[in-house]
Amino acid sequence: MILRVDASTAVPPYEQIRSQLATIIATGLLPAGQRLPSIRQLAADLGLAGGTVARAFRELEQGGFIISRGRHGTFVSDRVPAGDRDRERALLEAAGVFASQAVQAGLDPRRVLDRALDALTSSAVVEPI
């Protein structure tokens, strides 16, 4: 799974994780029933504290995106809303995070849009778990 946390942005790390996972789940790139890495494993992979990842997972569970089954693991919920409205919300959320990061990095908007379009038209935008 490809998740990125940018420490230089004003967006808290737990929110970056929550937003990215919500988008990946809402768009169907992670199917219902897919097991997620453990909090400990994901925290180690991203170089974050376990509490940071735990908060992201808690918020995802409250939003209905994931289900925690205790020591058996955490899984993508089979009740994730898949309607157009939810996909649009996920898209707007992802676009907002993307735009915020681009502005904070001082990037040229036209160049950012060109690179985003290149990424969207390439065959490997996001790698599944």
Image (cartoon, grey):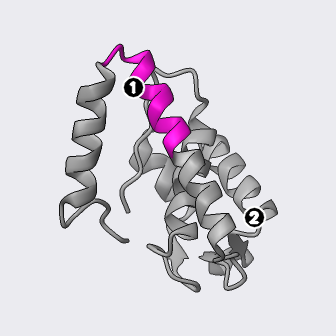
Whether residue 1 is visible, yes or no, is yes
The circle drawn on residue 127 is: none
Residue 69's image quarter? bottom right
Q: Quadrant of the C terminus?
A: bottom left
Viewer-nearest residue: 124 or 44? 124
> What secondary structure predominates along the stretch shown in magenta?
helix
Label 2 secondary element: helix
| Residue at 26% over, 48% down | 117
Decide: marks 1, 2 in contact (CB < 8 A)? no
What is the span of residues highlighted in magenta in the rendered image? 95-107
Question: Residue at point 75% right, 56% down?
Answer: 58
In the depicted view, which residue is nearer to us: 29 or 33?
29
Q: Which amino acid does label 1 sit on?
A: Ala
Q: How packed is label 2: few (under 14 Cα within 10 Å), some, or many (20 or more)? A: some
Residue that badge 1 annotates: 102
- Left or right, 20 with respect to 128, comes to right
The quadrant holding residue 123 is: bottom left
Mark number, residue 61: 2
